[in-house]
Amino acid sequence: MKRINIFIALLVASLLFSVNAKSEEIKPTKNVIVMIPDGTSIGVYSAARWFKLYNNLGDGLMIDPYITGTVTTFSSNAPIGDSAPTGSTYATGVLQQTGNVAIYPEVSNNDIFEVDASRTYQPAATILEASKILKNKAVGLVVTSEFPHATPADFSAHYYARGNYDVIAPQMAYQNLDVMFGGGNSIITDDIIKHFSNNGTTLIQDDKSSFLNYNGEGKVWALFGQRALPYNIDRNPDKYPSIAEMTEKAIDLLSKKENGFFLMVEGSQIDWAAHANDAATIINEYLAFDEAVGKAMEFAIKDGNTAVLVLSDHGNSGFTIGSARCPGYDKLSIEKLFETVSGIKLSANGLESILIKAEPDNIRSEFKKYTGIDITDEEFEVLRSSKNYRETDYTKVGTSINLAHNIVNILNAHMCFGFTTGGHTGEEVIMSAYHPQGDVPKGHLTNQQVNKYLQKVTGIEIALQELSDRIFVKHNSLFEGLNHSIDKTDPKFPILKVKKGKNTLELKAFSSVGKFNGKNFDIGSVVVYIDKNDTFYLPESLKQKLQ
Ligand SMILES: [Zn+2]
């Protein structure tokens, strides 16, 4: 308990002193870009720099001139979080539990700070929603995962379980995003397509040249692949855009908007490669993200009215240059440490898909072709005997019995990188920032303080909690005294029906289109339904409809 008190005291002290002695003076910028290299631990930056130097790929990283401090990210009841609560706290300022997406958490026995039970399950308004609703800005998301994955959902949807794409994907579609680039064609429903035709969203699917040539004024979604995009190291550049290309395109389209924009870019799969303990892919995936950072910084500096904040959401895998498996590693040359990783041309998953199809006689030569590594007899036997074990869950590639995991083990046996786990870790993450007047966050921050900074730099006049209380009011209190009922004919998408006199209001869960006496109207924000308390959360302005 004493330790917890000291920790809290330290957090409070950093809240008071380190965010910004002159936090009141942060000048809002017209445009705000947040970039999240998901699950990137500090060792990844170090390895990526050495990798660039060894391969003559230029000097340092794009983030290097902009590193301003570190951030401790955590969930409401644990020092280690996943992308759902950690990204959600950046987006909303509210600490949440594992799996929560932009929502007030349940109370638990281990809460680090007091959790307000009266708010449990209330959706928490995000900086993206505030930019759109309060500042009339254009909003966009760029990711390499499928679009409803945790981090993009953190900014644009609300639910207690990140995996429920059935309710997260429609919320993202009904947010009327100006730009959404990423993966997930198989998740697009007929209802989403219908909404896009109603709200004028162009949907580009698996068509890179249409995507690159798109220059329209309206909203646009461009999706590639059934689920996630391939890892950058496995990517066919004729079919799939890089994260830098998507970022550049998003900025190009959003920067034409009169009132400015909010954009979140996620390097989604650095985290996945870290879960898999796949060193070459971690480095390659980070460098692809770093190139996107270069595009954003280039725009921001030229534009003169754009702030950029780059920070990971949590650590992953305890990645280090140097491993106990590798005696004498601390005396090794740059060649010995970086030659092998520089010769690997595919991710472990990419290599898996080749070895699964390979005749046993060709396993050695195929392995050598894509990695430069001559495998031992023992390693050959491991590959041959695990040939048919495929792991589809990216969080388990590093730990379960599967071919990709065995490939990773062989790769790592030939290199000197260390991993402590196939899961997330709790150390602080690196923060980089650019602001035209130099009003960047400095020192050590908590994830809640990052959100405070975003609120200030976006120029939002009211607190996000106040916005939550405007757009996410419980239906029972909003329509108290009126005749209302919940139609659960479609159990996934219940409809709240409210009657007053001759007027009927119909509000469908996870949509932003309501019906007033049978006629569609734009609600202005998404309607969230939580089954756990059988409650709709709705904007207070809806009450006027029935006045
Ligand atoms: Zn993860």
Image (tube, rainbow, N blue to C red):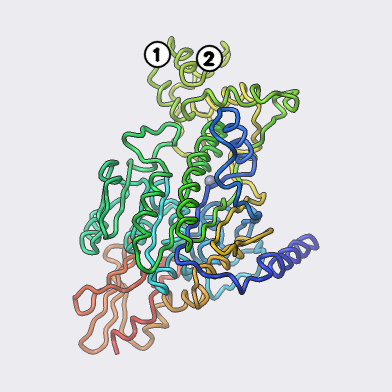
Quarter of the image where the N terminus is located: bottom right
Q: In which quarter of the image is residue 448?
A: bottom right
Badge 2, how many Cα within 10 Å: few under 14, some, many 20+? some
Is tag 2's residue or tag 1's residue first in the polypeptide sequence?
1
Residue 124 visible, this angle:
yes
Q: Return the x and y of residue 454 as percentages of the image width and height.
A: 53, 65
In the picture, measured across the screen, residue 23 lies left or right of residue 517, that is right
Q: Is mark 1 on a helix, strand or loop?
A: loop
Percent position of residue 305, x then y: 47, 63
Q: Mark 2 points at which residue?
A: 381
Of the residues shown, which amino acid type is indicated by label 2? Glu
Is the residue 275 above or below the residue 537 in the image?
above
The residue that appears at 34% across and 56% down in the rendered structure is 253
Residue position for label 1: 359
Q: Classify mark 2 as within 8 Å of ligand 1 or not, answering yes or no.
A: no
Question: Whole-percent x and y of residue 337?
Answer: 65, 25
Identify residue type, mark 1: Glu
Q: Residue 473 at what x, y percent from top left?
A: 43, 77
**Distance (Cα) linking label 2 and label 1:** 13 Å
Which of the 4 quarters of the picture holds residue 60?
top right
| Rendered position, 279 above or below 516 | above
Looking at the image, which is closer to me, 44 or 189?
44
| Disc marking residue 437 | none
Identified at 65% across, 56% down, the residue is 72
Task: Name the side, left or right, on which 210 lies relative to 20.
Answer: left
**Nearer to me, 415 or 290:** 290
Mark 1 vs ligand 1: CB under 8 Å? no
> Is mark 2 in CB contact (under 8 Å) with mark 1?
no
Using the image, determine if residue 229 lies above or below residue 498. Answer: above
